[in-house]
Amino acid sequence: MAGGRRNGHWVLCWLCVLLMVDRVSVASGLSTGAHTSPPFPASAVNQTPVVDCRDVCGLNASDRCDFIRTNPDCRSEGGYLDYLEGIFCHFPPSLLPLAITLYAFWLLYLFLILGVTAEKFFCPNLSAISTTLKLSHNVAGVTFLAFGNGAPDIFSALVAFSDPHTAGLAFGALFGAGVLVTTVVAGGIAILRPFTAASRPFLRDIVFYMAAVFLTFTALYRGRVTLAWALGYLGLYVFYVVTVVLCTWIYRWQRRRSLVSSMPATPEMLSDSEEEDRVSSTTTSYDYREEYQPLLFYQETTAQILAQALNPLDCRKWRNKSASWRVLKVLKLPVEFLLLLTVPLVDPDKEDRNWKRPLNCLHLVISPLVLVLTLQSGAYGVYEIGGLFPVWGVVVIAGTAWAAVTFFATTNSEPPRLHWIFAFLGFLTSALWINAAATEVVNILRSLGVVFRLSNTVLGLTLLAWGNSVGDVFSDFTLARQGYPRMAFSACFGGIIFNVLVGVGLGCLLQISRGHAEVKLEPEGLLVWVLAGALGLSLVCSLVAVPLQCFQLSKLYGFCLLLFYVSFLVVALLTEFGVIHLKSV
């Protein structure tokens, strides 16, 4: 998995983010009925007094539905389903455990949707964009690679920051994921494959991450994030990108100088090993896929190409996999089919760049339709132009005309010159699918917090952080088992720097763009400070312990990190349930 496989360009990144987080820029005239709770209680004139939504469980069963529907604190910002109304208005009190169980399964399936979309559609299209724009691996790795890997975390944070009621989810998820990755994932890598860490990248990343945590800690202490503070987050990340590129350039320059000063190898004098490498590289370049080509030339019809392109199941792989893989694949099939139907996918490693003429022409109609139906949870799509014709109808007509021109101007065998446009379209469409799923995740977690009377912070540091980080855990552990522990360990710190700086900075910046002078931060009691302190303490311990071990990470160090996370989790839960608290003076 080379760095160049998942990357892109800054301009595209900002464009897609502005579209993804449409909820922060949509005009009030496009609203479908969701009202934003006022940031200051004093401005709420002639409105129903705001009562904490978590008080609903203390009411009689007959009064809960009216409480949910009339209390502004119980309204969701965006999303397609009202989960609180579903629990308290459509399920009788005796079936409350059933409703919670169904919500839990739906939450797990949403995490599956996030993972499949990011892995199979979002990141590959980033790779195609990177290849088109000819970006270097270093720039791609710290920009769009980090964006692709952290897409669920970033979108969840942006959605959470758009609503004052769920801002605690953002801090809990970002800090909780930070503690999880820097302790459980890093410790697990050291346990699976003890190794020697790269000193300079480790020190660079951990110092930048500590700076990001300090910025967030200070913002929480001040209780607000201003425009300058939000821009400071994004500026620090830009400085981090520049530092990575400069360090890599200096390292390569020094390496070239050392190679030139040593005895150079000429074509006339190659060592045995170099000659063997050259021969082996020549022999291994054989394309074994030719063995699977049919003996007789057979040209598929347009209908066959479409049916094969929409089939998410490989029968040969199905026969060779285990039962657990098959069960998981069955769960993924509906999601993969829907994504294949709606998201274009460009693969620069294939000879035809994954050009499927009938399906790609169909994408020109369906993908723009998905874009307008997922922006502001469908508000853009159903908005009627001049009160006469809906936006989605205009999109369908324009897309159909574009698809017809493309279909008759191209062939099945050769991709068109402008095929790279499908990578951009697939990038935006998959990003909006992720944003839609992240919105539902945030709304479900908030509903579960209301039912169990849990704070958004503890939900963020547990369920949301675990769900968004499960992909990183499996991928990093796999890299470690395959013999690449240093690569996996570096990924632990590089990705979460992007998540914190861009997640908090961009989330607050977009909230300010709605007309607020600043973003008010109201830490939910002692738990937020416990979370921030634990993350800072884990980074300080790693900054001290790793150099003392001469950057040699042993199994003992890995078990110490796991013990630290367990201790942190126990303290966080005890704080949430009031066992640990501050004495009132």
Image (cartoon, rainbow, N blue to C red):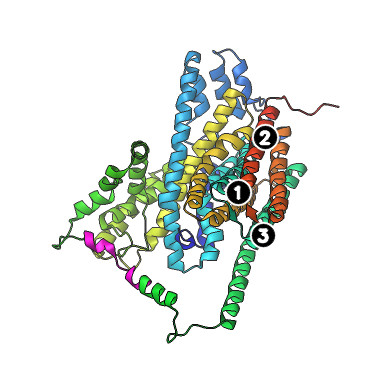
Quarter of image, res 276: bottom left
Q: Which residues are magenta?
A: 281-292
Q: Residue at x 73, y 52 (%)?
A: 544
Residue 76 x/y as whole percent: 55, 33
Image position of 172 with respect to 13: above or below = above
Q: Residues within 10 Å of mark 1 (few under 14, many from 20)?
A: many
Q: Does dot 2 land on a helix, a strand or a loop? A: helix
Residue placed most toward the observer, 221 or 111: 111
The label on residue 567 is 2
Dot 1 corresponds to which residue? 503
Which numbered disc, 2 or 1, marks the residue closer to the eye?
2
Disc 3 marks a residue whose amino acid type is: Arg
Dot 3 corresponds to which residue? 204
Image position of 168 with respect to 62: above or below = below
- Regarding residue 117, the answer to whether it shows in the image is yes
Q: Residues within 10 Å of mark 3 (few under 14, many from 20)?
A: some
* Chain-order first, disc 3 or disc 1: 3
* Chain-order first, disc 2 or disc 1: 1
Quarter of image, res 268: bottom left
- Residue at the limit of the structure toward the front, as seen here: 272
